[in-house]
Image: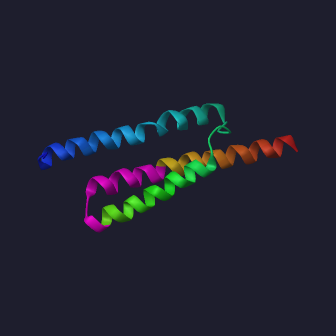
Amino acid sequence: MLDEFTLGIVAIFASILILIGWVPQIIQGYKTKKLEDVSKYLVTAIFGGAVLWLIYGISIDDIYIIGVNVAAMFLTMTVLMMKLKYENAFDSIRK
């Protein structure tokens, strides 16, 4: 079994790996103003999962679970808001 310090390190690295994938998507979307390949249903499902994990983390008072899921909620909402904004902007141009 791992001690508390080692588990903390594992949790930090797991959090980084979970969250880092959103950063290139946000940067690419900002540069190109296109997120048509990103499913709003996937992003919404991931956000819902993060909310449930946040509730769980709060109930067991686990700072790592709470922190990563607050960050995940922020990043997924960023991607979803960008997607909706850019899709609406392009729909207006096409009309």
- Point 26% across, 59% down: residue: 62
Spot occupied by residue 84 in the image (x, y as percentages of width and height) = 67, 49
Spot occupied by residue 78 in the image (x, y as percentages of width and height) = 54, 48
Question: Does 65 appear above or below 20?
Answer: below
Q: Residue furthest right?
A: 95
Among the 4 quarters of the image, the one containing residue 37: top right
Question: Does 34 appear above or below 3?
Answer: above
- Point 72% across, 45% down: residue: 87
Name the chief secondary structure element in magenta: helix
* Near-viewer residue (76 or 1): 1
For the image, the number of numbered tags is 0
Q: What segment is highlighted magenta in the picture?
A: 59-74
Q: Is residue 33 magenta?
A: no
Spot occupied by residue 80 in the image (x, y as percentages of width and height) = 59, 49
- Point 75% across, 45% down: residue: 89
The image's colour scheme reads: rainbow
Question: Does 59 appear above or below 21?
Answer: below
- Point 44% across, 56% down: residue: 50
Spot occupied by residue 94 in the image (x, y as percentages of width and height) = 85, 41
Q: Is residue 22 left or right of residue 93?
A: left
Q: Residue furthest front?
A: 1
* Near-viewer residue (1 or 76): 1
Q: Is residue 72 left or right of residue 93?
A: left
| Rendered-image quadrant of the C terminus | top right
